[in-house]
Image: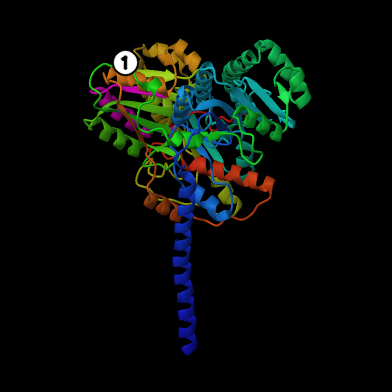
Amino acid sequence: MKSFFSSFLGSFTALVLFVFGGGFLLFLGVLVVASFSEQPQATVKSGSYLVFDLSTNITDAPAQLEAGALMAAFTGGDIPNQLQTRLVTRALHEAAADDRIEGMLIKGSFAPQGYGTSFAALQEVRRALEVFKKSGKPIHAYLQYADTRDFYIASVADDLALDPNGMVFMPGLASEGMFFKGLFDKFGIGVQAVKVGEFKSAVEPYTRTDFSPENRVQLESLLGELWGEMRDTVAEARQMNGQAFQALIDSGKSYIAEDLVTANLVDRLVYTDEVLQDLKEKTGVSDPKTPFKQVNLPAYISQIPKVSAAPEETPQDLGSSKGRVAVVYAEGVIVDGSGTPTSVGGSKFAREIRRLRQDPAVKAIVVRVNSPGGSATASEHILRELRLAKETLPVVVSMGGYAASGGYWISTHASRIFAEPLTVTGSIGVYGYAFNIAELSNDFGITWDRVKTGKYADTLSISRPKTEDEIALMERMTNKIYEDFIQRTAEGRAMEPAAVRDIAEGRVWTGSQALELGLVDELGGLADAIAYAAQSAELAKGFRVSEFPAKKELAEVIAEALEQFQPSATKAGWLNKVSQEASKVVSELEQFNDPRGVYARMPFDLLIK
């Protein structure tokens, strides 16, 4: 008995130490992450260069302190670097007029994650860089290993330098799909799918082994438009025409450092120390141990009030300055319920919009959409609240990288829709699917039996394929949602339903194409949308901007970390990538939670490289 109590007390003590010790380490980890996430107030010396390090993920929504960052602190990984599109563009506008800023250095390479660092967001950033350049201040860029995103931004520079051992890889855009039908067939997993829309390809990964002809057509058109815009922008910056640039990259003579200089895609080949020495001379620093006068972009952003309107967002004096514009960020897949930090929860966002429209201080709402869509039910809940808000307030939509399917659904009734030329939008179509594991179960000797009180009582079972009547029911539901989507678009865009059907069919369009088709009203960024909303609400200079979702409080971070904290094993590089891809697939499958099983979503994974 004594041995038992000794063992019990020892185990209990170890458990207590583990729990409290783990909690203490968790608390320390949160503090570490918080210390990294908060930039110190910038001290900008006269004659400084603004350093724009591209080694970040540019998102639409404000940076969130998530459990992922906490895990990085515990496991010794890099804490994810994240900047917000609106703050980046505001900082660049501020710096253009700031007498303390002498010029700019662009360096590094982007680290896109999720729906961040989209081509549309980069288009906004590049416009802001052009404003900086027009102020007469020089922009220097130093690249080592640059891809399409990096070179698209760096090409704005007056002086574009490359490491002698570096390279630029801007070969064009490609979309690669992953198809699971062969895997499902091998393991005896059945899939039955229904869809409305000739181009609605979201079910293809489960039902085909390659792209359908219709999907291939729309992808070729979409990528052609996106690439043409980026290619021509870069070519013009390097004093070339688009066709000559295309011929150059297709020849394979625009990737190696020496070839890049010969082709005039970069100005010079220099090492890092040479760049630093040049900048020291330009900023008047002679001490070899003292770095050139500089301030990095995150630190510079820290001195800008995050809730006030930027100069480019402020209209002329029109009336009282009292009141504010609320910016709601719908970034990520639209799901039913409250969602997660990286998704758009239908009930959560509807509740927030309801709160904003009932707040007398809110004079206008801007919805920044960066979403491929998702749950049709959740999309309708969000749209319902936006339609109610529009009865008393200007409701403006700003489309980011993606505003397709459900992302377009929630945009349809806005007072005005802004999109970037590189925005992916449209995809007016819906689909549904049903999995079954009958063959897989039988292969392992598992059989099923059932008792039911009605014809459709076991329709949701995955133990058998759906009957013809059940498939017909799914088709009726899907057709009904599609008709609702057509009607919402027709009403919101003041179009005839027949005209909407002609451009619907689940097809995706670029922002430029959407403008021609009447799906959006104007090309422009978030700043343009905020300015329009403020002007519509007759707000004067000095109006404030509030954002949702707001940054998490410390208690929320700890709660989220406790739920998600899991020790990670060290993996080899290729194995880690395979694991990440598998985890991504599982995570995306979990986002299909519409209670009716019907979705307004883009192709399952429109991966553009």
Horizontal and vertical percent position of residue 42:
46, 38
- Most common secondary structure along the magenta stretch: helix
In this view, 528 is above or below 42: above
Q: Nearer the viewer, residue 36 or 58?
A: 36
Residue at figure coordinates x 50%, y 14% from the top left: 513
Magenta stretch containing residue 387, yes or no?
yes
- The answer to which image quadrant residue 158 occupies is top right
Lateral position of residue 415 relative to residue 168, left or right:
left
Q: Nearer the viewer, residue 193 or 262?
A: 262
Q: Is residue 302 visible?
A: yes
In this view, 363 is above or below 178: above
Residue at figure coordinates x 30%, y 36% from the top left: 352
Q: Which residues are magenta?
A: 374-398
Q: Is residue 564 visible?
A: no
The amino acid type of the residue labelled 1 equals: Gln
- The answer to which image quadrant residue 90 occupies is top left
Lateral position of residue 596 relative to residue 233, left or right:
left
Horizontal and vertical percent position of residue 234:
62, 18
Q: Which class describes the residues within 10 Å of circle 1: few (<14), some (14-19), or many (20+)?
A: few
Name the residue beneath numbered marker 1. Answer: 316
Magenta stretch containing residue 111, yes or no?
no
Lateral position of residue 289 relative to residue 260, left or right:
left
